[in-house]
Amino acid sequence: MPKDPEELYRALAVTNRGPAAVWGHQQDILRDWHANMSDEPDVAIELPTGAGKTLVGGLIGEYRRRKYRERIAYLCPTRQLARQTAAKFDEYGIPNVLLVNPVKTWNQAHQAQYEAGEAVAVSVYSHVFNSNPALDDADMLVLDDAHAAEGYVASPWSLGISRTSAESAYLDVLSVLESALDPLVCTRLRAPDPDNSQSSYVYLASPIGVAEQGVALERVVGAAAGAGKLSTSATHVWRLLQGHLDRCLVYVSYGQVLIRPLIPPTMQHRPFSDPARRIYMSATLGDGGELERSFGRKRIARIPVPKGWDREGTGRRFFLFPELTNDLSAAPKNVPAFVSGIIDSAGRAVVLTPDGRTADAFTRYLPKTHPVLKAGDVEDDLTTFTSKDKAVLLLTNRYDGIDLPDDDCRLVVLAGLPAKGDLQERFLHESLGALEVLQERIRARIVQGSGRATRNNKDWAAVIVLGRSLTSYLSGLDVQASLHPEVRAEVEFGRRNSLNTPSSEMLDNLAVFREHGQDWADVDSDIVADRETYTRTVAPSAGELRKAARFEVAAWEALWNNQLDWALTAVQRVLDQLTGQRTPQRYAALWNYLGYSIAERLARQTQDLSHRDTGARYYRDLQRKGQTSNFLAHLVAPSDKAHAPALGELDPLDEAAMRGIIARTELHRAHGFEHTIAQARTGLAGTEFTAYEAGLVSLGTLAGASESYAEDDTLKPASPDAVWIFDDTRWIIWEAKSEATSTGEVSPENVRQAQGHLSYTEAERETSAPSGSITLLMSPKPKVLPAAHMIAADHLYLVRPPAVLTIFDRLVRAWHTARARTITALSPTELAEIFQAEEALPSQWLPLLQAQPLKQRTP
C-alpha cells in the first residue's frame, strides 16, 4: 500500500495513460491534505480550470479506497461531466464505475464493485441529493464543481408549484397564503393576466403567516400531490417536506410558488451527512461562506489555490462589450444584428443566459442559418453541437458542466447578470437587494461561464458581454478587484477597448484576436503586464458573511427541528456577525425579519412576554436596515400587521436629521447661522469648484447630517466632493462638476469616478455604508452618453444645479422658523413638524435628488 496519494500515483503512472507525474502544485495540495486535513470531515480544495483538480480529487478518493477499502463516490453536476471524469480516471489508472442515468438501468456488477470498495463510483449530485437517493452508503464523497452545486443540493427540499398547468395547485396554495401576503399583492397574483411591470417580482410570504397556516398548507399540498396536481419532481420533494412546511420560506411570483428552507437541512440527509469525509473540489471557493450555506455545513476547512495559480489563469479570453461602443450605445436597436454577425462568422457559439425570459429574448440575436441546441441536446454527447459547422448552444442558468476546448468553440456570449436562479435567489437579488450574499455565486458563474471555451493554457475564445445589469456589474471597481487577476486584466482590457470606439473597430480587433498572430501577441503581452499589477482583494462584506454562515446553518438546523429557542439564539449570533465593518445591511434586515418571526412564535407558544420584547427589537432593526429594500414595501400581510409592534412616529432618517440639527448648536446663534447660509448660497449659486464644494458641506449640515465634510482633494484626489453622514441610517455622497459647461454629455469617466466614491468612503471610515446610501453626480450637462448609462450602478443619481438650490432654500426657511422657537427646546418630533411644513425633511427632499437614476431600468 502506498504511504500517501503521491506515491500512489507514481505506482499508477507505470502502466497508465496519464501524465508521467503529478504537477508541483498538485503535489502541494496532496501533501497538505494528507499531512493536515485527512481527518477533517469537510475539506474544500480550490484549483482553477486546467490545474488538474480531477486528478487531485481522484487520487484522494483512490488512496482512501485502497488503504481502508472505503466506498468512494465522486459526484459531478451533469452526466456529461461524469462521463468525462470516468474517462480521465481510466487514463489515470483509477478503477471506477460509471453510475449515471436512472437507477434501474445501472449495471448491477458495477454497483456491486462500488459497494465492495473495489472501484470508485462516478455519478451525479442527483443520486445523493434526492428523496430516494441511490448512493446512500458512501464512506467519502468527492463533490466536483462544488461552487455550482447550490441548486442540486437544495433540490430535494425545493417544492415548486407552477401556475402554467390548468390542473396546477398554484391558486389553491395562494388561497391558503392569503393572510401571509399583502392584500394588494394577492389581488395582483389572482388576476387572469399578469401585470407586466410586476410579473417577475418575487414576494416573500410572512413567516408568521406561513406558520399560522402550516396545517392548512400541509393539507392543500398533500391533497394536490394525491390528486396528481404537482409535477413529478415536486411530488418527490413533498416526501421530505411533510411536517416541515411551517419552517420553510415561501416565495411567490405570478408564475410560481416556491416552498423551501433558506438553507438546505443536509444534516438530516444521511447519504450526505453520514460519510465520515467530504471533499469539495472547486475552481472558485470564494470568501463569504457561500459553500457552507450551499451545503448546510457549519465549517468547511480550506486548502487555498496553489501559489502561481492565484494570479495566472487558463487560456485567453477577449471580452467584447458591444453596448459600450460609440455607435451601438447610441443606437441599441442595432446591437442584435451586430452580435448576430459575430456569431455567424464564428460558426459555433455557446450562449449563457440566467433565465428563460432572457433566453427567449436572445432569439433576435441569432442568425437564421444556425440551428439552436439546448442543454438536453448535449447532456450525453457534445458532438451533436461540435460536429456542426454552424450552431448555437443556448443554455439557461448553466454556467458549468460544458467543456468546449480548442476548435470545439471559439465564441461565448454572456447575456444578462447571472443572478436569476430559483425564486429564492431572485428574491435575494431583486426584491431584497442583498447582492452581497450572492457575490460569490455571481462571480463564479461569470468566471466559469466565460471560461467554457478556454480549457487549457493554449486555448482562446472571444466573450461577448450583453445586458445593462451585467455590463454595469463588471464595471464596478469592487467587483473588478475581487476577480482573479487574469480575468480582471481581460475584462478591463475589453472594457477599455469598447468604450469610446466605433463598433467597426471592435470587429477589427476581433479579427486580430482570431488570427492569433504576432499582432495579437503584442497585445497579449499588455494583458499579462496588467495582470501582474493586480492582486485579488476580498469583496466588501465577505468577512462578515463568512463569520455569519456557521450560525446561519445552526439557526436553520434548530428551526428545522422545531427548536425555536435555539434558533432564536443562533439568529442573534448571525446578527452579531453582521454588525461589523462593511456589513451587508439588507441581508441583516432579512435575518431581523426571521428573528422577529421566531420570537413572535415563541411568545405565543410559551406566553413569555420577554420574547415579544425581543421580537419588537428585531422588528425595529428590520425597519431601519431594510428601509430602502423593495420587500419592506410589502410587509403589510394581515399576519404581520396583527403582531407587529408599534414603531416611532418618525422615519429613522428624518429622526436622525432632526437630532443632527438639534446638536448643531453653533448654528443656533444668529451670527453663525447667517454667515453660514450667506457663504453657502454664494457657493451653490456659482460654479467655482472650491466654493461649491464648501457650499455642499454647509448644505449637509443644514440638512441635519451628523457629519458633513470634504477631504482635501490635493492630498486625496480620489475623494468625494462632500460626504453627508446621517448616523447609521444613510450616507449621501457627492461628486460635483460645478465648472462643467451646460452643453455636451456626461461621460462614462464621470460616472465611474462618481460611483467609486461609496467604496472609497467605506474604506476610509472602515465600515459599511447603511442600506440605501447613494452617490450624487451633480452636473449641468443636459445629456448623458448611452455608455455612461450602461456602466452606472444602482446607487448613482444625476442631479442638476437648480435642484440643489431648491433644497437649500427649503432648509433655510425651516431653520428660520425653528430658530424663532429655540431649537434646543424642541423634541425631534416637534422639530420635524416645522421642517415638514417646508418640505425640508430628508424623506421629502431625497426624492428630488433621486429623480434621475443614471442606471437605466430597461433590461
Image: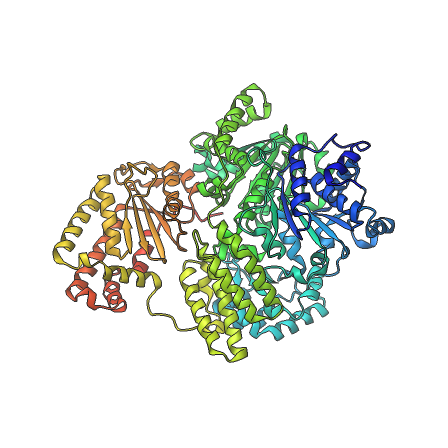
| Closer to us: 215 or 365 | 215
Q: Is residue 367 visible?
A: yes
Percent x, y for residue 194?
Answer: 53, 60
Q: Residue furthest top?
A: 518
All told, the count of numbered labels is 0
Q: Is residue 320 visible?
A: no
Q: Residue furthest right?
A: 109
Name the quadrant containing residue 455. Answer: top right
Name the quadrant containing residue 450. Answer: top right
Is 819 on the left-hand or right-hand side of 178? Answer: left
Percent x, y for residue 441?
Answer: 56, 48
Is 569 on the left-hand or right-hand side of 86? Answer: left
Residue at left offset 67%, top offset 40%? 31
**Quarter placement of the N terminus:** top right
| Closer to us: 394 or 7 | 7
Residue at left offset 44%, top offset 64%? 622
Percent x, y for residue 14?
Answer: 80, 31
